Structure formats: C-alpha cells, structure tokens
Amino acid sequence: ALMPPTGPKGYGLMTQQDLKQGDFVMEYVGEVIGEEEYAERKLEYQSSGRRHFYFMSIANGEVIDATRKGNLSRFLNHSCAPNCETQKWQVGGELCIGLFALRDIAAGSELTFDYHFERDGDRAMKCLCGEPCCRGVIGTTKQQQRRDREEERNGGEAFAAAAASESAAAKEL
C-alpha cells in the first residue's frame, strides 16, 4: 500500500501482509531506455524541478525509468538497513528486476531497499533512513566502491579509518 509522504522522504510503500525471507515482493517496472535517453531525461527532470527520480540501471547501458510508466515499486524508499533487495531475472528472454524480502517482514511495515547507485560527480544526497547504521548519504563514488572491494579482500582493517572519516564528512551534509 502507498504510504502518504513523510517529510522530505516523500511517499513510501508498506506491505499489507506478512512476508517471509526470500518472498517475491514485486517487479520494478518502467520504460527501458538507453544511456543517451537517460542523460536527457535526468536533465529534463532536474530542470523541471522534480525532487524524486525513479531510475534503475539494468545492464549493458539500459536503465528503467519508472517516472511516467512505473508501478508502485518506484515508491520504495532507500535504507542503509533494508528489508528488501533487488535481483535480476531473465523472464521470457527479457531482463527484469524483482524485489525480494531479505528477512521476515510484518504486515504494516515499510518496504525499503539499498539503492546502491553510483554517483559520478553528482552531489551526495543526504540519507534520511534513520537507521543506526546509516551511512549518511545515498549512493557511493567510484573511489568508495574500489575502497569497499579492497576492504572486503583485506578483512576490513586497512580502510576502516578512511571509511569513518568519509562517514563523518557525510553527516555534515
């Protein structure tokens, strides 16, 4: 069910039934567009004053734009401790994005997922999830993604100080 706007987060989506870990929640639906059209629409939406964007990268330069022709899935908010995740599936030869429960979710709970988008020079967007583990910003930079991969390979110790420093800087946004 669609949740009314809650402050700067905008709309949200909540489940009306209990969900079990691994349950399919819904498909992320919209227009499939290429990189060039994505860049044009992003500029168009920004210049028209839109605050919320509904883009999701698929693969091979294709992006789902759920702004005009999407379903309710576009209203799932970001969380640094999400209860859903996206999975790519081939259905009838088409690549689709499904949202699945990461854990058991009680009816009446807000559905969230980690947007995992990569910022490429764009200004960081402040995260509003309110979770104790909140990273302070939504999305990562290429440099941060490289550092995270290196941290995973090295057990996390070498880059802990850098990550703490970046997290502190993000909270200043």
Image (cartoon, rainbow, N blue to C red):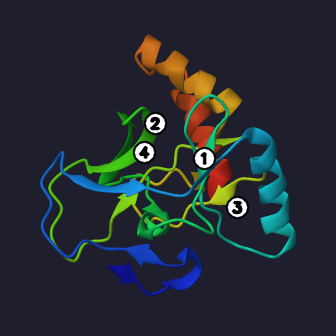
Residue located at (46% from left, 54% from top): 134
SS category of the residue bearing label 1: loop
The alpha-carbon separation of the residues under discs 2 and 4 comes to 7 Å
Where residue 139 is drawn, which disc sits there? 1
Q: Which residue is mark 2?
A: 95
Is 50 located above or below residue 91 in the figure?
Answer: below
Single out the mark in the foreground, 3 or 2.
Answer: 2
The alpha-carbon separation of the residues under discs 1 and 3 comes to 14 Å
Earlier residue among tags 4 and 1 = 4
Left or right: 119 as drawn, with respect to 84: right
Single out the mark in the foreground, 2 or 4.
Answer: 2
Tag 3: residue type?
Answer: Leu
Where residue 97 is drawn, which disc sits there? 4
Earlier residue among tags 1 and 2 = 2
Earlier residue among tags 1 and 3 = 1
Single out the mark in the foreground, 4 or 1.
Answer: 4
The alpha-carbon separation of the residues under discs 3 and 2 comes to 36 Å
Picture quarter with the N terminus = bottom left
